[in-house]
Structure formats: C-alpha cells, structure tokens
Image: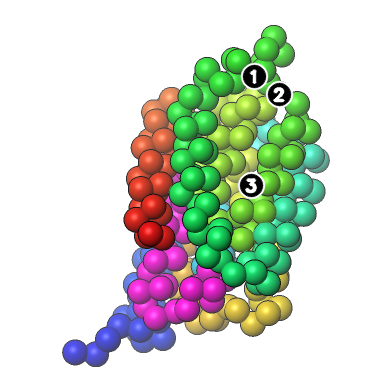
C-alpha cells in the first residue's frame, strides 16, 4: 500500500478538505488550526514547517469569512484604530518567537491558555457586568493590550486564537457575538498575513500543500461565515464554549 504523503494527489485532496473544514471552524469561532495542523503532521510535514504552512494556507479563509461578515463591519469599525497596530506588533513578535525559540515550553501552555479563554467566554455576561461597572465595557486600550498578547500567541501557533479574541472582546466590545465575529475574523487576517511574511522569508512554507489548503479555506471560510450569522448569538457562544473545551482536552492529550 502506497503511503499518503503531502505531495501526492490524494494528500493534496485531503489538504483541500482540511482547509475547507478548518476555515469553516474559524469563521464560526476559531480553532480551525486544530483540524489542519494535525493533518499536515499526519501527511509527513515537520512540525515547524507544518505550523508555517498552515498559517499561510488558512489566511485566505479568514479573509473570505471576514467578507461574509461585511454587513457587520459598521458596528465595530471604530475599534480598528487601536486594535490593528496591537495586532501587527503582537503577531510580529509571535512569529519571531516561533522561528528562534524551541516550542516545547509553549506547547505546555497551550491547553491552559485555551481553557482560560473558554472559561472567560463561558462566563462572559457575568464577567462583563463585574469588570465593566456602569459604563458597560472596559477601556478599548485595555482591549488593545489583550489583543497584543493574543496576537503574540496567534503569530506563534494560533490554535484557539479565535476563541481567545472572542473572550477578550466580550470585555470591551459593544455588540453581539456576530459583531465580534466580524471583528475577530478581520484581525485574524492581519495576524496570519504578518506571520506569513516571516515564515516565507525563512523558507518554512511548503508551497503546493499551502495552495491546496488555501483553495479549501476560501470556500469554507465564506460559506461558514454566511451560515454562522443565522445562529442566535447566545447559542453561538455556547457552541464556542463546548468547542473550546474539546480543544482543551485534545491539546492536553496531544502534548502529554
């Protein structure tokens, strides 16, 4: 039996569908890397190269899902002035750390980071009421600091960064889950593009597998982005929390 490899026709078809599913998951909440990254590893790609190839392969999906939320941009457009610079700086630092440092220490932290983000999102209404006081939300500049930290993580690895962004946005963004999803998807594009530039410069991206991921990601991101807006905001938040708990368990067992 011929083994399936990332540079075989069957391997590329698998990557196409992995990109479609991963980008669809990202459009709903985040965590699509959990789908596509293990597929790359299973097809014989080394861990660091798989991470870089995955980041570049999924960014068109983030863009297409962001466009699917274009009707929601008006509600959160005033946050971009503070969040985009923080996102660029954080993603730059995260990508640099991925290139120059070993990943073993950060791997240990990944399930804990995702669990914290998931719990914040689970208790979003109570936390927001407790933290925000009479103003209804925390400072946007506090949000920029949180976004910087999340972008460091996103530039480094990225699995679950969508959940983390939604959890942070729950503390300072005025709007429902769909408004936050629109903002989150746009910032995810920024993180992936910044990281992609670093990874390309270091020769860490496998071009053909990356193109297969991209093709699937564009389709999955747009379709899921449109479908997710039909889901009631509270139900979507619950779904994201459940997914986050599943991701946490997977990472605990994966890296132990």
Q: Secondary structure at mark 1?
A: helix
Assess whether mark 1 and mark 3 are in contact (beta carbons under 8 angstroms). Answer: no
Kindly state the secondary structure of the residue where label 2 is placed.
loop
Alpha carbon separation for disc pair 3 and 2: 17 Å
The answer to whether the residues at label 3 and label 2 have Cβ atoms under 8 Å apart is no
Within-10-Å neighbours for mark 1: few <14, some 14–19, many 20+: some
Mark with earlier residue (3, 1): 1
Whether residue 132 sits left or right of residue 42 in the image: it is right
Q: Earlier in the sequence, mark 2 or mark 1?
A: 1
Residue, disc 2: 138
Residue at image x 44%, y 79%?
A: 45
**Can residue 118 be seen by looking at this rendering?**
yes
Residue 235 drawn above or below residue 220? above
Circle on res. 29: none
Q: Residues within 10 Å of mark 3 (few under 14, many from 20)?
A: many
Q: Give the residue pinned by disc 1.
A: 131
Residue identified by numbered label 3: 150
Q: Are marks 2 and 1 in contact (CB under 8 Å)?
A: yes
């Amino acid at each position: 039996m011929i083994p399936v490899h990332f540079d075989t026709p069957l391997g590329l078809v698998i990557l196409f569908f992995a990109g479609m599913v991963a980008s669809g998951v990202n459009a709903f909440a985040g965590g699509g890397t959990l789908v596509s990254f293990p597929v790359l590893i299973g097809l014989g790609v080394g861990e660091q190269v798989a991470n870089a190839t995955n980041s570049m392969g999924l960014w068109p999906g983030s863009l297409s899902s962001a466009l699917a939320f274009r009707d929601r941009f008006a509600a959160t457009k005033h946050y971009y002035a503070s969040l985009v610079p923080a996102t660029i700086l954080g993603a730059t630092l995260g990508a640099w750390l991925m290139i120059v440092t070993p990943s073993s220490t950060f791997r240990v932290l990944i399930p804990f980071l995702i669990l914290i983000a998931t719990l914040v999102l689970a208790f979003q209404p109570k936390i927001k009421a407790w933290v925000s006081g009479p103003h209804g939300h925390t400072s946007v500049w506090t949000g920029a600091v949180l976004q910087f930290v999340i972008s460091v993580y996103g530039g480094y690895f990225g699995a679950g960064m969508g959940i983390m962004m939604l959890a942070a946005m729950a503390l300072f963004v005025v709007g429902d889950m769909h408004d936050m999803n629109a903002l989150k998807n746009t910032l995810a594009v920024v993180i992936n593009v910044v990281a992609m530039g670093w990874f390309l410069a270091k020769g860490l991206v496998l071009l053909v597998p990356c193109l297969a991921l991209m093709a699937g990601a564009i389709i999955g991101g747009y379709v899921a982005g449109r479908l997710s807006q039909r889901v009631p905001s509270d139900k979507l938040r619950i779904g994201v929390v459940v997914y986050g708990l599943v991701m946490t368990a997977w990472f605990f067992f994966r890296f132990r």
